[in-house]
Image (cartoon, rainbow, N blue to C red):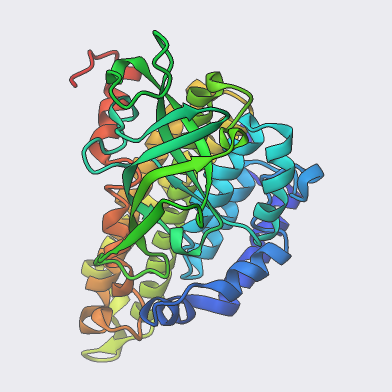
């Protein structure tokens, strides 16, 4: 069992860390408060090859895997710049297209995803169904050679800053009712479509969120959006379910990596403060166990989460999907709790300073709290572990 990174992975970590520190949390917060995107950081990360580390070299990527992309996510977050679109564009969209798209789709989209000139966001969640793809109301139907999609999605990240949306819809395939919106949900099978954000009939509205982030959340409306046949991911409808699942583990792993990086950032900021802040006779406040022990506990939880993230990424890159699924869910669970604990503990350790923008920890409270809900809630992860690890009957 080897816990060491390869020399190339070590170099990647160091390089991304350096890039992140050149921008830092002040840059991230300023962009978020101005309602702007982290365009400069994104494009520089793309130019340096960090956005495409998991994309094959033949399409302009680095030829690595989710292990390498998790390093990028973690190190940028550890510098105070947790980029949400790293999860939805390189992790989900690039993985789905690379593994299940046609060769034409790979050639058309992967080079742009690798260099950062293209962004593809992901749309599965719906107001009524959540992420339960068995009950999605967005339906695609055939109309000649075209596809026509209608439905609505919610909590779609960054669609205002993307070229395409990877939309999960359901297609009826039985009894000659292909694509009928009246088909029973059990007769519909999932399919993924690459939808241009300027497609007629596709509109969105911003959701007001109590999260400080340069990436906004949107309600997405698809009103008879007409697409050519090659908008369907893969050669046939049979690719839909495997394609959908292929994006979920990378999503959980990279979200977990971003959470671990955020936890590292918070504990480091708090440690810097408590090791230099002196009160009552000249001793630093970090010498008091009431301050240092909670920080140490948070650091332990973050490090444990990092170990599970590493395990999940290695299993995924080795093609051990079932094992990776368990580890990816556990990693996301552990990381979300650790990040929330680390940020809250950092705020408490800094006292009043912890609530200021200047010290840069309270600015992360909303994001780490949301991490315990999205992209999959801790309760659904516990359901998954109960069923797939402990052998319990499904409760829903």
Where on the picture, by quarter, is residue 365? bottom left
Above/below status of 218 relative to 280? above
Residue 184 position within the rendered picture, expressed as x and y whole percent measured from the top left: 27, 18
Q: What residue lies at 45% left-to-right and 77% top-to-bottom?
A: 36
Above/below status of 44 relative to 296? below
Residue 330 position within the rendered picture, expressed as x and y whole percent measured from the top left: 38, 35
Q: Nearer the viewer, residue 358 or 190?
A: 190
Outermost residue to the right: 58
Residue 239 position within the rendered picture, expressed as x and y whole percent measured from the top left: 56, 23
Q: What residue lies at 26% left-to-right and 40% top-to-bottom?
A: 378
Where on the picture, by quarter, is residue 138? top left
Outermost residue to the left: 395
Total numbered labels: 0
Residue 372 position within the rendered picture, expressed as x and y whole percent measured from the top left: 28, 49
Above/below status of 222 relative to 260? above
Q: Visible in this render: residue 299?
A: no
Q: Quadrant of the C terminus?
A: top left
Q: Nearer the viewer, residue 176 or 41?
A: 176
Q: Visible in this render: residue 184?
A: yes
Relative horizontal placement of residue 361, taking residue 101 as reference (left or right):
left
Q: What residue lies at 55% left-to-right and 45% top-to-bottom?
A: 91
Outermost residue to the front: 144
Q: Nearer the viewer, residue 184 or 111?
A: 184
Relative horizontal placement of residue 64, taking residue 41 as reference (left or right):
right
Relative horizontal placement of residue 141, taking residue 384 as reference (left or right):
right
Outermost residue to the top: 175
Relative horizontal placement of residue 104, taking residue 214 as reference (left or right):
right
Q: Quadrant of the N terminus?
A: top right
Q: What residue lies at 30% left-to-right and 88% top-to-bottom?
A: 278
């Amino acid at each position: 069992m080897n816990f060491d990174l390869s020399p190339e992975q070590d170099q990647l970590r160091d390089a991304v860390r350096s890039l992140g520190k050149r921008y830092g949390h002040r840059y991230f917060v300023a962009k978020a408060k101005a309602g702007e995107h982290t365009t400069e950081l994104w494009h520089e990360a793309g130019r340096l090859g960090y956005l495409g580390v998991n994309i094959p070299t033949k399409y302009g990527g680095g030829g690595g895997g989710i292990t390498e992309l998790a390093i990028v996510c973690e190190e940028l977050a550890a510098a105070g710049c947790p980029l949400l679109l790293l999860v939805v564009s390189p992790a989900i969209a690039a993985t789905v297209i690379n593994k299940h798209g046609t060769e034409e789709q790979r050639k058309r989209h992967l080079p742009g995803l690798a260099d950062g000139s293209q962004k593809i966001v992901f749309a599965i969640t719906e107001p009524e169904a959540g992420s339960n793809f068995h009950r999605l109301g967005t339906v695609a139907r055939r109309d000649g050679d075209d596809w026509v999609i209608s439905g609505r999605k919610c909590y779609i990240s960054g669609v205002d800053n993307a070229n395409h949306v990877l939309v999960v819809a359901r297609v009826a395939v039985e009894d000659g009712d292909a694509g009928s919106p009246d088909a029973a949900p059990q007769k519909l099978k999932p399919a993924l479509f690459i939808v241009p954000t300027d497609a007629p009939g596709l509109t969105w509205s911003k959701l007001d969120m109590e999260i400080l982030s340069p990436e906004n959340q949107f309600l997405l409306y698809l009103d008879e959006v007409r697409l050519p046949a090659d908008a369907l991911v893969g050669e046939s409808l049979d690719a839909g379910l495997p394609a959908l699942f292929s994006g979920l583990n990378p999503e959980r792993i990279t979200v977990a990596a971003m959470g671990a990086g955020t936890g590292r950032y918070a504990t480091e900021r708090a440690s810097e403060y408590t090791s230099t802040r002196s009160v009552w006779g000249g001793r630093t406040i970090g010498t008091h166990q009431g301050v240092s022990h909670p920080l140490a506990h948070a650091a332990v939880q973050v490090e444990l989460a990092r170990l599970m993230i590493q395990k999940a990424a290695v299993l995924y890159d080795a093609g051990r999907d079932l094992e990776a699924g368990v580890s990816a869910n556990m990693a996301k669970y552990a990381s979300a709790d650790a990040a929330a604990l680390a940020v809250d503990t950092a705020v408490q350790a800094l006292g009043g300073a912890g609530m200021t923008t200047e010290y840069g920890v309270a600015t992360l409270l909303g994001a780490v709290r949301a991490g315990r809900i999205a992209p999959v809630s801790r309760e659904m992860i516990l359901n998954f572990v109960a069923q797939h690890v402990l052998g319990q009957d499904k409760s829903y």
